[in-house]
Amino acid sequence: MQALDEGGSGGGGAASNASNQNGMNQLLPLMEAQEGVEYWLTNHVLIPGGMVFSGVVVAGVGVVATVAVCSTVAGCLLSPITGGVALAGAGLALEGVYYGFTQKVWDPTTGKSCGANGCN
């Protein structure tokens, strides 16, 4: 049992630990590169893609609802609501495109772009 606790077979624990450390030192640049790719992919593709996709879906539902509601004369009174849903979905999709390029979210109430380092 003692040999296994020392990291090797037959008392070579110090040499085995050194080779393990050497292997980790060789893997470190690859792990850092992978982390960089994951960060870029998440912030430039996955998050904006999700925003654009969900915005397009919401806008599509709003347009379909507007057309369906306006098929009756009385239903056209609801078209501002369903049209607003379509505009909100389009806004979300555009926000996704903006976030994909700038890594910031536009705040229309202040007129500023806000990101990880604050608003400007």
Image (cartoon, rainbow, N blue to C red):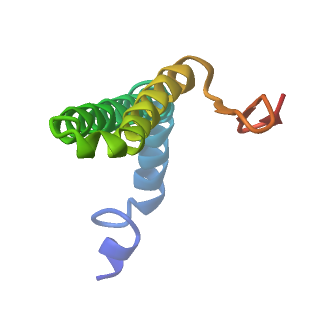
Of residues 2 and 44, the one drawn nearer to the viewer in this rendering: 44
Image point (44%, 31%), residue name: 87
Name the side, left or right, on which 96 lies relative to 114.
left
Which image quadrant: the N terminus?
Answer: bottom left
Determine the image quadrant of residue 75: top left
* 106 over 17 or under it: above or below: above
The residue positioned farthest toward the top in the image shown? 101
Q: Position of residue 44 (x, y in %)?
A: 47, 24
Determine the image quadrant of residue 59: top left
Image point (78%, 29%), residue name: 111
The residue positioned farthest toward the front in the image shown? 73
Res. 48 visible in picture: yes
Q: Position of residue 3 (x, y in %)?
A: 32, 73
Name the side, left or right, on which 14 lies relative to 105.
left
Of residues 36 and 10, the one drawn nearer to the viewer in this rendering: 36
Determine the image quadrant of residue 45: top left
Image point (52%, 28%), residue name: 95
Image point (55%, 26%), residue name: 99
